[in-house]
Image (cartoon, grey):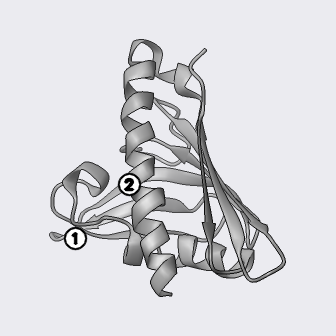
Amino acid sequence: MVEPIVKTLTVGADASEAFRFFTGRIGSWWPVGNAKYSGDGAADVTLEDRVGGRLFATFKDGEERTWGIVKEFKPGECVTIAWGAPISQPGEKNNVTEVKVEFADHGDGTCTVKLTHSDWDRLAENAQETRDDYFEGWDYVLGECFRDYMAKA
């Protein structure tokens, strides 16, 4: 079994605000200009705020590529995404892992953001290699991009 990735970050906002920034403003902090994290030519990233909503990149030519489908959406608490790049149809199961992001208030205007990326075994022979790549990727996306955005918010 390939172990899940777990990343945690403390931010200077309560859980409700951090959740809104993570989900509703993802295009403002996601590294859209970096082809590794968004695809070459991506102009924006959007997370639709409902169960069944998409996480997708919009490219300069107007094309949209779906990376994930929202499985759970609890404002101020958590968002869970069936994660695969790209998912061509909602609910498609090929090479889909799961990303769950939880927000826990500390009661002092700060919160912990905990990201768990799991279900690597669905990727069969590519599971460990893909997980290792995402391990470093989440350090950058969550640990730098989201952290830096929240520090300025």
Residue at x 44%, y 20% (from the top left corner): 128
Could you tell me which secondary element the residue under label 1 belongs to? loop
Inspect the image, locate mark 2, and give the three-letter code of the amino acid beneath it.
Answer: Tyr
**Residue 130, how many percent across, how many down?**
39, 28
Classify 10 Å Cα crowding around label 1: few (below 14), some (14-19), many (20 and above): few
Residue matched to label 2: 140
Q: Is residue 88 visible?
A: no
Q: Can residue 59 be seen in this view?
A: yes
Could you tell me which secondary element the residue under label 2 belongs to? helix
Residue closest to the eye, 95 or 133: 133
On the image, which quarter does residue 125 sit in? top left
**Residue 90, how many percent across, how many down?**
51, 48
Residue at x 39%, y 41% (from the top left corner): 136
Inspect the image, locate mark 1, and give the three-letter code of the amino acid beneath it.
Answer: Gly
Which quadrant: the N terminus? top right
Disc on the earlier residue, 1 or 2 = 1
**Residue 118, how many percent across, how many down?**
60, 34
Residue matched to label 1: 62
- Nearest to the eye among marks 1 and 2: give it: 2
Residue closest to the eye, 52 or 36: 36
Cβ atoms under marks 1 and 2 closer than 8 Å: no
Classify 10 Å Cα crowding around label 2: few (below 14), some (14-19), many (20 and above): some
Image position of 36 with respect to 104: above or below: above
Image position of 64 with respect to 117: above or below: below
**Residue 84, how many percent across, how many down?**
44, 41
Image position of 114 with respect to 49: above or below: above
